[in-house]
Image (spheres, grey):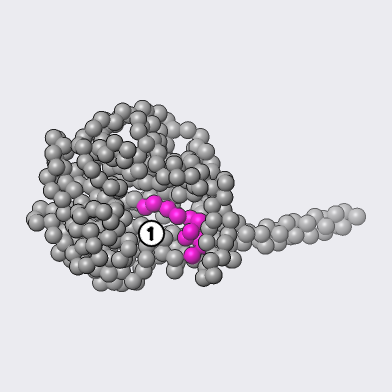
Amino acid sequence: MLFGSKFFFIIFVLLCILYACNHKSDKLIINSQKSKISNFHKKSNVEFREFNSANLIKPLNFHFYQDNLILSELGKEAIFLFHEFDINTGDSLSSFVKFGGGPSEVLSPISTGLINDDLYIYDLTTQKIVSLALDQNKNINNEYTLNDFYMWVTFESDSTILGVGNRKSFAKIERLNFKNKSLGKEVAFHTHIPDQYSTEFLQDICQTLLVTDPSGENYSLLYRYIDAVEIFKSNRKNSVLIQGPYFNELSYEKAYTGEMFVMLHTEETTENFIYAYATEKYIYGLYSGGKAIERESQTSNTIFVYDWEGNPVNEIILSRKILSFGITPLDDKIFSYDLDKGEIIYADLF
C-alpha cells in the first residue's frame, strides 16, 4: 500500500510537470527577471510657463545643444521640420531641414539623436537616416538607407543604432551599423514566446519606446500596453523588468488582415508609456493610463521617473497635458509644447 501511494504521487507530479510544459507555450513571458513597485518615492507637482509662442504642428523630439534648444515637428504642412531657440531668452534662431521626400529632405523625423556636434535623424516613412553638422550650415550632408523597417530607433554612436519594432524579427532590440548596412544583430529577447506567435503579431502587442543614456552604454525599453520599464545596463548580464504601480496587463483580440495577424484593442487595452526621454541619471516615461481606444490617451500630464538601477524615483504631475518633452542634461528643467495654446513651455524640476 505504501509503495502504491508513492507511485501515484510520482505519477501526479509528472503529470503536473507535463501539463505546465504543454501550457507554457500559451503564455508570453517578456522577462522572468521582474520586480514590482507599488508607488514612487516622491510625488511632485510642476507648473509650466511660456517659453516661446510658436505656431508648430506637432513637436516631437527635444535636444539641447550648447545654449540652444532644438526641436523637431511632424506634419506635412510644415516647410521646415527643425527649429532652434536660444534657451536663455526664448528667441527663435533658425529653422532647417525641409519637409519632402527628395534628397536632403525628410518626411517624418520620428527618431533623432545628438552626437557631439552632429544631429542624426531617422525618417520613418522613407526608412533612411540623415545627418547634419549643427556647428556649420545645418544642411544634410549624409544619407543612409536602411534595409529593414523600425518603429523607433535610438542612436548609440555616429554609426550604430538600436532599433525596435522590426516585424521580420522576434528580437526586442536590434543593433545595426547604418553606415555599412551590416545585418542587424539581435541584442535582446523575450524569455518565452508562444509557438503560435508570428514576428508581426509579437511586435504589434509588445510595442516599446527605446531610450539610451548619453554614453550610449545603457538603454531602456518602456512598454506601450503594460506599465513596465525594462533596463539594460552594460555592467549587468541580464535586463530587469520593473512593473507597476497599476500592473496593467496585455489586453487584445487577434485579427487576421489577409496577410498577417494583428492586435485589435479591446475595452480593457491600456495605453501606458507614450513618450520617453533619458539623461545620465534618470529615465523619464510619459505615462497615459487611458484606454487605447480613446483619443485622449495620446497625451498625459504624468511622468514616471526611474534611475538606471530601476528604482522608482519620482511621479511628476504636470500642470498641462503634453505629447512629448525634453529634459535638460542637469535634470533641472523640462521643455514641452502646448498644442492647444501654440506655446513652447518649460518648468523647473526637482
Residue 298 image position (x, y, % from top left): 41, 45
Observer-nearest residue: 33 or 265?
A: 265
Q: Secondary structure at mark 1?
A: loop
Q: Which residue occupies the extreme right position in the image?
A: 1
Which span of residues is magenta-colored?
200-210
Q: Residues within 10 Å of mark 1 (few under 14, many from 20)?
A: some
Q: Is residue 22 left or right of residue 318?
A: right
Q: Which residue occupies the extreme front position in the image?
A: 77
Q: Is residue 262 left or right of residue 236?
A: right
Q: Which residue is mark 1?
A: 151
Observer-nearest residue: 253 or 246?
A: 253
Observer-nearest residue: 233 or 94?
A: 94
Residue 330 image position (x, y, % from top left): 23, 37
Which quarter of the rendered picture does the C terminus lie within? top left
Q: Which residue occupies the extreme left position in the image?
A: 136
Which quarter of the rendered picture does the N terminus lie within? bottom right
Q: Is residue 78 left or right of residue 162?
A: left
| Kind of residue indicated by mark 1 | Met
Q: At 54% across and 56% down in the image, what residue appears?
A: 264
Q: At 70% across and 61% down in the image, what residue appears?
A: 18
Exactly how many numbered labels are in the figure?
Answer: 1
Residue 187, can we see it? Answer: no
Residue 41, can we see it? Answer: yes
Q: At 10% across and 53% down in the image, what residue appears?
A: 135
Q: At 13% across and 35% down in the image, what residue appears?
A: 89
Residue 252 image position (x, y, % from top left): 56, 53
Q: Is residue 250 magenta?
A: no
Q: Is residue 136 above or below residue 54?
A: below
Dividing the picture into quadrants, the one containing residue 161 is: bottom left
Dividing the picture into quadrants, the one containing residue 185 is: bottom left
